[in-house]
Amino acid sequence: MKKIITFLLFFLGFTFAGFSQDDNPIEVETSVKKISDTEYDLIFNLFIDEDWHLYSQYNPEDASLPMTIKASEGESGYTLVGKAEESDTHQEFSEIWGVDEIFFAEEATLTQRITIEDPAIRQVSLNIEAQVCKEFCLPYDGDFTFAIDGGKIVETVAVVSEASKDKAASLKINITNPEILDAEANSNDPEDDKTNLLQIFLLGFAGGFLAFLTPCVFPLIPLTVSFFTKQSEKRSKGVRNSLIYGIFIILIYILISAPFHFIDSLDPEILNTISTNIWLNIFFFVVLIFFAGSFFGFYSITLPSSWGNKMDSASGIGGIIGIFFMALTLAIVSFSCTGPILGSLLAGTITSEGGPMQLTAGMGGFGAALALPFAFFALFPSLLKALPKSGYWLGVVTVVLGFIELALAFKFLSNADLVGHWNLLKREVFIGIWALIAFVAALFMFGIIKFPITKGKGTNALRIILGLVILGGVVYLAPGVTKKPIWSQNALSGFAPPQFYSIYKQDNNCPLALDCFKDYEEGMAYAKSVNKPVLLDFTGWACVNCRKMEENVWSDPSIYSTLKKDYVLISLYVDDNERTLPEEEQFDFVKPSGKIKKITTYGDKWATMQTVNFKNASQPFYVLLDSDLKVLNKPEQYTDVTSYYKWLKDGLKEFKK
């Protein structure tokens, strides 16, 4: 198993290198030497920047990651003869790993012999995976192509059938005024982005504050602050070290989001694919149920003790590095309490439409909330006396968090149910489960139900008041199981399934019982026949903001009336991946990167249509069109009632021209 230190060093490398292979401090030149008709030496000459180390194939497994050389993905017809021969290496004892490490500095030559089995082969590709380190480490992953016949290297071109090309062409909407989309691409309001990121940061901060109020973290505040203040000759040094410690806590949690920036840059649809994957949502459901059980005190979740011991021993190095490992030790030993909250935040942000920047903002908020108490009490250590003592109240907070985890778990099961069209967690069933969870939580507050973590303790006035508040939530939820709730439950928008996903018979399965089409061609043909503009709605079954728009914005009487009378609604569900396209409509689509994407489901088709035509992969995404494929105004996304109504009316004015 790869060591957790190496894992974090890789994250540092991704962050500092901006996820670009070109930023690695290595240059590579290649050449080929023929040994016989079937044997060739493939030679890599590597030039390494000053003070950087590139680790050898023979570096110990329990140290920095050793280099590997293998055939590139999809290659066949030849075999590698053993490991590559290496030029002279250096050897040095590592204080962190406790072993001698083997590495290259400045220059290296690698000679990999291959045996050709297919005489038709004219070129081969090898892949190098390695780790290069200075104060931090960067991953190196490169493919190199060699022309073994002495000719020119020919780039591989994706080959698809003419039929696939014709079907792929059908995804292209021949917009008659594409300049309006170009303007939209450059008109994103940075203030909106800042507002969204701030909201996610605050949500993460709230999660981190809840984690601070758990038995695994709260008691560590006085211990840690006292350690820094007593171990330092001057108070100013203790304060400085405490602040650095807090900064490292924030950094560690931010680094968790780093790989998602990398995978998002490879494929803009990847996070949408992850968020709508049925089995991933089921996995999150099971994990959160498991986390809830730990909060109820039925068992404890901890990372392997060897991880904490290793980090704790590394923290004795001293200086900045030692403080970093102290922060890492905190993250590991407090995992039994922070893990469930962190897991909920991670899962919730991945399965949202915000992308990796929102994940980073959420993780930053979480880390900031954990770090703030350490820094604050280091600055004002006398206030430590004002902190309440650890005890029974922490157990109560933990159990309440367990109920929150339980409720969130059913949200992920609902996502899987919606995308899979299983018809198990209809809206009324989902709300009923949430009402039941809230009712049991109220009974716990009243002391009627007990859990192992609070066993033997009674209730008090504060718990009774909180129990009454939770009971008020039950009263709010209860009418949701009826056909016509006696009051609006729009506060559940985005969490509960859509209103048309009901156990009671509905007029149709469109939002708010509006008339809609779920096929682009059918909807456009109808719009042409009735001479109405089109509202092209790129949406998703598991899209939280789509439900909020439909139930809080579309439900406004003026907007609802406009949609019903003046527009043809075409709702395209980009996560409709359980409905397979007829075989004759499936095809291969070549991405700009040259990779082939299989279009086999309706979700594949609509998601690709959105990215191809509008260079956007988030939902909701609204476009107003006429039947001549003229865009009536700039596309709209998640917004408020006033802005959306004006947008619809502006589109109508343009249509009537």
Image (cartoon, helix red, strand yellow):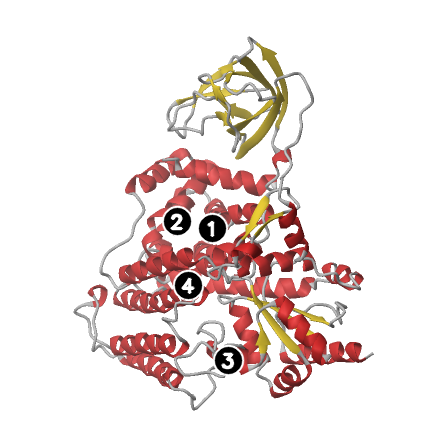
Label 2 neighbour load within 10 Å: few <14, some 14-19, many 20+: many
Label 3 neighbour load within 10 Å: few <14, some 14-19, many 20+: few
Observer-nearest residue: 330 or 136?
136
Residue 342 is situated, as x and y percent measured from the top left of the image, at 41, 57
Label 1 neighbour load within 10 Å: few <14, some 14-19, many 20+: many
Residue corresponding to mark 2: 331
Label at residue 229: none
Q: Which tag, 3 or 2, sits closer to the chain's start?
A: 2
Q: In this view, does 622 lie to the left or right of 249?
A: right
Q: Give me the residue at 41% from left, 62% from top.
A: 383
Q: What element carries label 1?
A: helix
Residue corresponding to mark 1: 253
Q: Is mark 4 on a helix, strand or loop?
A: helix
Residue 363 is situated, as x and y percent measured from the top left of the image, at 49, 55
Q: Which amino acid does label 2 sit on?
A: Ala
Considering only vertical position in the picture, is 588 above or below 548?
above
Rendered-image quadrant of the N terminus: top left
For marks 3 and 4, give the CA distance: 21 Å
Q: Which tag, 1 or 2, sits closer to the chain's start?
A: 1
Nearer mark to the viewer, of 3 and 4: 3
Considering only vertical position in the picture, is 96 above or below 535?
above
